[in-house]
């Protein structure tokens, strides 16, 4: 009996998950290329033609699959219950730092991936991939917002993560200290922004009103 379409898709997803880290490692030398897929397949004992079919969408399919493996690894390493005792900014910092540690030593692969994702024909998909990772991080951090905050938080974090990666790939400081300091500054800025926004969006009756304050001075409540 042959595989159903759903089973075939699931099998290909498993194959992509298995090969993606190997393709990323090969991208250090071969770039995000079909040759990299072949080399990864040989290393994993997988038929090269099957591997190429799994990544028939080309470079973006390879990069997308790699990012999915990073997302999944992050969720396993830092589940919500492990982050629960931290402050929100600490949770986000821990999640981004874990991702940076996960790709340490693969700077050339990351640099190549960022360049490919920034190409005009790939930009929209690249933004969706960044959004997906940001959404995963916020959910692990315990965010349950469903209003406009849901979108603004993810857009901001996706931008912070992309900017941090761009700094990280060229960071030669000890332990990537400059990149981590850059990350901390950006997260602190977002937290300040979120606090200011929360105050601005308070119900009118909860906001400070100079007119109401002066009125109470003139006509104190009995």
Image (cartoon, helix red, strand yellow):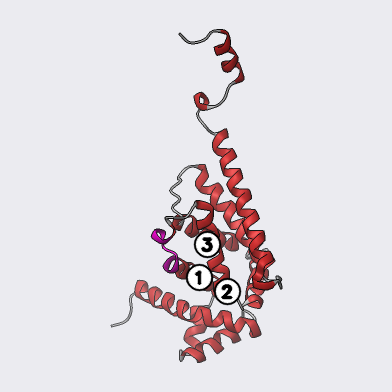
> What is the crowding at mark 3: few (fewer than 14 residues within 10 Å), some, or many (at least 20)?
some
Is-magenta flag for residue 78? yes
Is-magenta flag for residue 193? no
Q: Are marks 2 and 3 in contact (CB under 8 Å)?
A: no
The front one of 5 and 34 is 34
Residue 218 image point, x, y percent: 58, 8
Residue 103 image point, x, y percent: 57, 74
Q: Decide which of tag 2 and tag 1 comes sooner along the chain.
A: 1
Residue 90 image point, x, y percent: 52, 56
Q: Are marks 2 and 1 in contact (CB under 8 Å)?
A: yes
Dominant SS of magenta comes to helix
For residue 173, side relative to residue 5 (left or right): right
Residue at 48 percent of width and 79 percent of height: 54
Is residue 166 in view from this perspective?
Answer: no
The front one of 136 and 175 is 175
Task: Check the picture and name the quadrant holding the C terminus.
Answer: top left
* Secondary structure at numbered mark 1: helix
Mark 2 or 3, closer to the camera: 3
Residue at 53 percent of width and 48 percent of height: 151
Q: Decide which of tag 2 and tag 3 comes sooner along the chain.
A: 3
* Secondary structure at numbered mark 3: helix
Magenta residues (range)? 75-82
Q: Give how far apart the Cα atoms at labels 1 and 3 are.
A: 14 Å
Q: Which residue is mark 1?
A: 70
Q: Which residue is mark 3?
A: 94
Q: Which residue is mark 2?
A: 103
Q: For residue 5, what is the image quadrant?
A: bottom left
Q: Decide which of tag 1 and tag 3 comes sooner along the chain.
A: 1
Q: Is residue 186 shown above or below 24?
A: above
> What is the crowding at mark 2: few (fewer than 14 residues within 10 Å), some, or many (at least 20)?
some
Q: Which mark is residue 93?
A: none
Q: Are marks 1 and 3 in contact (CB under 8 Å)?
A: no
């Amino acid at each position: 009996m042959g595989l159903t379409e759903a089973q075939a898709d699931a099998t290909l997803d498993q194959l992509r998950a298995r090969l993606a880290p190997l393709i990323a490692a090969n991208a250090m030398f071969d770039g995000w290329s079909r040759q990299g897929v072949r080399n990864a397949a040989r290393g994993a004992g997988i038929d090269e033609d099957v591997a190429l079919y799994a990544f028939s969408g080309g470079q973006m399919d390879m990069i997308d699959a790699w990012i999915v493996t990073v997302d999944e690894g992050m969720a396993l390493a830092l589940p919500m219950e492990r982050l629960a005792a931290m402050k929100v900014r600490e949770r986000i910092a821990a999640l981004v730092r874990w991702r940076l540690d996960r790709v340490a030593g693969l700077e050339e692969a990351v640099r190549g991936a960022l360049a490919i994702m920034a190409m005009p024909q790939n930009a929209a998909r690249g933004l969706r991939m960044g959004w997906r990772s940001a959404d995963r991080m916020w959910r692990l951090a315990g965010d349950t917002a469903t209003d406009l905050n849901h979108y603004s938080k993810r857009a901001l974090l996706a931008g912070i993560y992309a900017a941090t990666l761009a700094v990280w790939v060229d960071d030669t400081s000890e332990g990537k200290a400059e990149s981590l300091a850059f990350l901390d500054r950006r997260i602190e800025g977002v937290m300040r922004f979120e606090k200011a926004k929360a105050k601005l969006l308070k119900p009118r009756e909860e906001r400070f009103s100079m007119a109401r304050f002066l009125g109470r001075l003139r006509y104190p409540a009995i």
